[in-house]
Image (cartoon, rainbow, N blue to C red):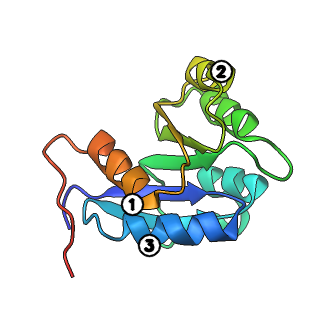
Amino acid sequence: MPNQAKVLLVDDSADDCCLLLNALEKFPCLQVVAALEDDIETLFYLNGAGAYADRSRFPYPDVVLLDLQMPALNGFQVLQSIRAEGRSHPRVVIISDSNESAALEEAHRLGASLYLVKNGRFSELARRIAEFLSDPPVEIARG
């Protein structure tokens, strides 16, 4: 499908990951290329290192959906690493349980494109992500 945004989902909660993946499937403008539960693996993926060297199997994402609470590095450190390489791409959307203004400000300072609070309504999160990534209005797959 043309104009699909390649999405890398990074969340250490298997439940949240599964719920968000199901919600994202309803938007044909989004193509999830990988869902990772580990922040270090995320850096390997983005750098095309190790098991992720084959870009035909592991395409570079247009957007990273990044949870802040991760096992080794936190989302801020992953975001900082992405931006330290001087890349403006991929866009990074923070998905967090925290609605603290300090977290929001830090995410934007480090170069996040959007900050969304997980509120248990994953279909709403997916819709907001799709709208953010689409110039024309988004389509919702029915079925």
Q: Considering only order in the chain, which callout, 2 or 1, is on the residue closer to the N terminus?
A: 2
User: Disc 1 to disc 3, how far (Cα)?
Assistant: 8 Å
Q: Is residue 16 above or below residue 44?
A: below
In front: 68, or 15?
Answer: 15
Mark 1: secondary structure? helix
Q: Which mark is residue 114?
A: none
Q: CA distance from mark 2 to mark 3?
A: 29 Å
Q: Position of residue 53 (x, y in %)?
A: 62, 64
Q: Which residue is identified by label 2? A: 106
Marks 1 and 2 sit apart, C-alpha to C-alpha, by: 26 Å
Report whether residue 100 is seen.
Answer: yes
Tell me which label, 1 or 3, sits earlier in the chain.
Answer: 3
Taking the view exactly as shown, the residue that stands out farthest to the left is: 136
Determine whether the residue tagged by mark 2 lies in a helix, strand or loop.
helix
Q: Quadrant of residue 85?
A: top right
Residue denoted by label 3:
22
| Badge 2 amino acid | Glu
| Of residues 117 and 38, the one drawn nearer to the viewer in this rendering | 117
Q: Which mark is residue 123?
A: 1
The x and y percentages for residue 50 are 72, 65
The answer to whether marks 1 and 3 mark residues whose Cβ atoms lie closer than 8 Å is no
* Other residues around mark 3 within 10 Å, as few (<14) / some (14–19) / many (≥20): some
Q: Position of residue 58 (x, y in %)?
A: 52, 67
- The residue drawn where x is 66% and y is 37% is 98
Residue 12 relative to residue 91: left or right: right
SS for callout 3: helix
What amino acid is found at the position of numbered circle 1 in the picture? Ser
**Which residue is found at the position 36% from the left and 71% from the top?**
25
